[in-house]
Image: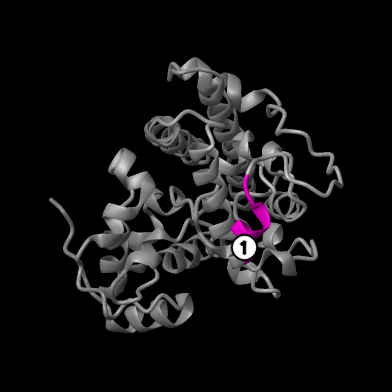
């Protein structure tokens, strides 16, 4: 028999205050569920369910969910919410609380962090393979191989100072609307980015610096620009108001329109990530179960 749910208004107030998620206006429209890339691929992470549980004050029940560890922190759920509820902020609070209460050990949390970094390496390998061939076979042996091998070369990281772009068109006029000329390479964007723990894999500061110097061809042929999860933290953190997320989206569009990547690459990349997120969830389940 399923145990009865015991809502707690006191817990609800504490959860809302501690998380800063603004859960009260949620009307369970499920827009967040439809936007979440992990949920679209696996049906295993429903931000709406977690917010609904929070409005009922079900703290213990939420902390027992493996779902809170599937979140990529991409903030898409937050960005699309019509009532400005912040499911990602709620999930972040629940993770911290799970560690604080000892429900997830510090060692398990560190293992999770190390795996999340390796996962970005896998995403880079997958994007690189897709760019090299028309198809990629999605198999478990690929996953295991990518978990352990070093990341592929992420383009030429040596910045060459030249006064002209390697691509056609007026690149400066193209990128100036994003305030990129104001960038002085302080690295706040990379420090804020949730997937730039290994800057050999993904480094927003390098991308913006290269774009600012007109080194467009190495960027447009790099698999790294496709790793961005569109969270917008680079833009939020920039003291110079550089619109980092928009810069990367522009580079992706330019890579397609100028023929640096196949026209169908964005579709194939989206399809490939559906597979990779399923493996991502399975790996986290294994990590959490082995900790008990």
- Let me know if residue 154 is in the magenta part: no
Q: Which span is picked out in magenta?
A: 169-176
At x 38%, y 54%, the residue is 64
At x 64%, y 47%, the residue is 110
Q: Residue furthest front?
A: 169
Residue 18 image position (x, y, % from top left): 47, 79
User: Along the line of sight, which residue is nearer the eye, 53 or 73?
Assistant: 73
- Determine the secondary structure under disc 1: helix
Q: Is residue 201 visible?
A: no
Residue 33 image position (x, y, % from top left): 28, 55
Label 1 belongs to which residue?
Answer: 234
User: Along the line of sight, which residue is nearer the eye, 273 or 22?
Assistant: 273
Q: Is residue 209 left or right of residue 289?
A: right
Q: Is residue 237 left or right of residue 32?
A: right
- Let me know if residue 171 is in the magenta part: yes
Mostly what secondary structure, the magenta segment?
helix
Q: Residue furthest right?
A: 161
Q: Is residue 269 visible?
A: yes
At x 55%, y 34%, the residue is 123
At x 59%, y 70%, the residue is 236
The answer to which image quadrant residue 116 occupies is top right
Q: Is residue 28 left or right of residue 144?
A: left
Residue 134 image position (x, y, % from top left): 45, 18
Residue 127 image position (x, y, % from top left): 54, 30
The answer to which image quadrant residue 271 occupies is top left
Give the vertical position of 280 relative to 106 (above or below).
Answer: above
């Amino acid at each position: 028999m399923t145990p009865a749910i015991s809502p707690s208004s006191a817990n609800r107030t504490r959860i809302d205050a501690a998380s800063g998620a603004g859960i009260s206006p949620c009307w369970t429209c499920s827009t967040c569920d439809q936007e979440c890339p992990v949920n679209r691929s696996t049906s295993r992470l429903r931000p709406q369910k977690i917010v609904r549980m929070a409005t009922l004050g079900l703290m213990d029940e939420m902390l027992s969910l493996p779902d809170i560890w599937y979140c990529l922190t991409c903030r898409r759920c937050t960005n699309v919410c019509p009532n400005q509820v912040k499911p990602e902020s709620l999930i972040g609070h629940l993770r911290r609380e799970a560690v604080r209460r000892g429900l997830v050990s510090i060692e398990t949390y560190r293992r999770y962090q190390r795996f999340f970094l390796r996962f970005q390496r896998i995403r880079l390998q997958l994007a690189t393979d897709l760019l090299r061939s028309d198809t990629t076979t999605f198999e478990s042996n690929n996953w295991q191989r990518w978990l352990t091998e070093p990341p592929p070369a992420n383009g030429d990281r040596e910045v060459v100072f030249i006064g002209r772009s390697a691509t056609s068109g007026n690149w400066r006029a193209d990128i100036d609307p994003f305030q990129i000329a104001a960038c002085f390479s302080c690295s706040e964007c990379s420090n804020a980015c949730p997937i730039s723990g290994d800057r050999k894999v993904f480094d927003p500061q390098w991308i913006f610096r290269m774009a600012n110097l007109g080194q467009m061809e190495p960027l447009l042929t790099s698999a790294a620009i496709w790793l961005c999860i569109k969270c917008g933290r680079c833009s939020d953190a920039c003291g110079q108001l550089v619109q980092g997320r928009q810069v990367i989206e522009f580079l992706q569009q330019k890579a397609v329109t100028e023929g640096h990547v196949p026209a169908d690459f964005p579709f194939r990349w989206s399809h490939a990530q559906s597979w990779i997120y399923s493996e991502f969830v399975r790996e986290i389940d294994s990590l959490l179960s082995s900790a008990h």
